Image: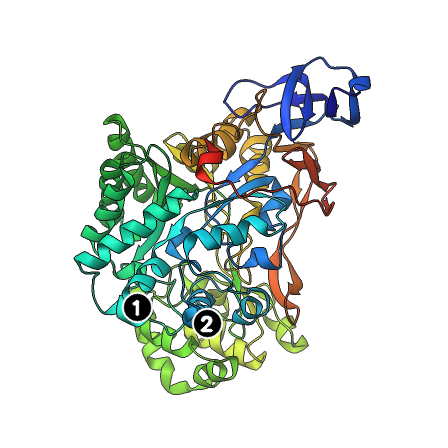
Amino acid sequence: MAEFDKVIKGGTIVDGTGLPPYKADIGIKDGKITKIGHLKSSDAKQVLDATGLIVAPGVIDLHCHYDAPLHWDPSCSIGSWHGVTSVTNGNCGFGFAPVRHKDADRSMYSMERNEAIPFEAMKATMPFNWETFPQWMDHIHKLPKAVNMIQLVPVTPLVSYVMGGWDEAKSRQPNDKQMTTILQILDEAMAVGANGWAAQRLTGYGASVQRDYDGTLMVSDLMSDDFYLALSKGMSKYDRGYAQFAQVSGGLDEGGGPAKDMSFAGQLAEASGRPLLFNAVAVVDDRPNTFRSMLKVVDEYNKKGVPLIAHALTMRLSFRFSFDDSWNFFDNVEVWRDATLGSPEEVKAKLSNKELRPEMKREYDKTKQPKALGDIADYICRKVFRDELRIKYGDRRIGDIAKEENKHIIDVLLDISEADDWKTQWATPTRNHSPELCKEMLTHQTVAGFSDGGAHTKFSHLGSFPTDLLTWMVRDTNTIKLEEAHYKLSFVPAWVAGFKDRGAIREGFAADLMIYDLEKLGVNAPEVANDIPPNNNTRLVQRPTGYRWIMCNGDVTFEDGGATGANPGKLLRCSDAR
């Protein structure tokens, strides 16, 4: 009888702990790594020849929104294509439990605009045969999964459930009795394996770009300091779990608001005694002191023994959007928010209304808003559908067109879009150009990532962040070592999540692995996939090259970039993760 189910033979192991790479074989039995060393091929039922390849622990992505997409995409792509083997849901405080049956549609509407998840896809695939959080966990447990899944308790449905609905929850803070119930439900969730709680509070920088379906702030945005401190104190009784928290309470100046937001996150971590993952810290190349001021606060709390961790947005990223497809990232500006709310027909009619433009222009001239994704003048006319417009404007910068035609920036954006039946795809400027600044961000207590997987899929493709980091920062610029990259991609997030048997290549650990050719590793150009039910709705994807095998719990889920159809992923209840 074979000693191993599989032997990975001849690979170079990067074990995730930060130790230098070394060559060895890996024996896998019953989903676990049972031996590392020089193994015989004859001792295995199957041999995977990894000669010349890197063998590393699967990526742990702690910021995802697959709560809904899991129902139609068990692989949780696109992250799983790029080496992700474990994901966390419930982030930003958004999700579907607890929920009363009468509020099922309302809970889906709450995810439609802020995370750009199509309502019709949720309606067609989600049975809502649960109400409580334990019932939700049992539901997720039963669904097929190609990746492991961790679940946080999302604040928005939690508070809405206790206060009798979204409208009531937005009208005031929970009273003492309701706060007691909220903490009791958190206890119930932790008892069945929830990993903690999650929330966003984005009230600054004009206002949140992640809003409810009607343009109002989310419930989590409206909760007070005292509310979040009470949640954190409620976590202090547990020797497990963590919190995810996102906050923008002021402008994105260098220091000031961002540092204060990080400091409040540190207070939450101190109150709970558990890790708190702050989303997010990003390199804005022309304002490096912003992320430096935030990470200085992280360092100060870490020196005091407080487990405050920043989630670093390491990927070189840009967004693509058109005005005919649920664009919401201008929602921090009232005139734009009002114009882009409603059905596609209503949005087109409002954007065609020239009476709105003076206010849009005044806002831009005064503040350069909306600029959450960079200056509109730097947007590129990436894809145009009408031939005459493509010839004239294709791949050109809005600012250059405006100068040539003596037009306002806003007029260029809207005139071209309208002439192209609002289908024109605009590309925002690419952020995070500097490998040295990205390296600086990673030298602090940070997790590399994140994907926002399952959300904003029409506009972004952040799920390719592991491949981007390994190619750009390791291979192409030699800015960080390979072992440093995998430490930040796997080991540190495993520590945050509380895993005792994942995030590294060790005997006895789960066989969650990525096996790849570093020289051939790459990220293809973004493309549109028509694979969201029920009517083949679209999303933006970015496929990789160079991955030979990706494994979850000892089973191969992807081979040479193609899905095998295996779904060995597990719901990792908090007790299991330890």
Q: Is residue 402 left or right of residue 141?
A: left
Tag in front: 1 or 2:
1
- The answer to whether 508 is drawn above or below residue 408 in the figure is above
- The answer to whether 211 is drawn above or below residue 526 in the figure is below
- The answer to whether 50 is drawn above or below residue 237 in the figure is above
Tell me the residue at 67%/29% (across/down). Answer: 30
Q: Is residue 94 left or right of residue 39?
A: left
- In percent of width and height, residue 432 lies at 46, 45
CA neighbours of label 1 inside 10 A, class few (<14), some (14 to 19), many (20+): few
Tell me the residue at 21%/56% (across/down). Answer: 224
- CA gap, disc 1 and disc 2: 15 Å
Q: Is residue 568 left or right of residue 437?
A: right
Residue with the most extreme right position? 42
Mark 1 in CB contact with mark 2 (< 8 angstroms): no
Q: Nearer the viewer, residue 308 or 252?
A: 308
- The answer to whether 524 is drawn above or below residue 490 in the figure is below
Tell me the residue at 48%/69% (across/down). Answer: 327
- In percent of width and height, residue 360 lies at 35, 76
Query: Does residue 249 show up?
Result: no
Tell me the residue at 55%/77% (across/down). Answer: 422
Amino acid type of the residue that numbered disc 1 sits on in the rendered structure: Gly
Element under disc 1: loop
Which residue has dot 1 on it?
164
Which residue has dot 2 on it?
105
Query: Does residue 442 show up?
Result: yes
- In percent of width and height, residue 486 lies at 53, 30
Colour setup of the view: rainbow
Element under disc 2: helix
- In percent of width and height, residue 183 lies at 27, 50
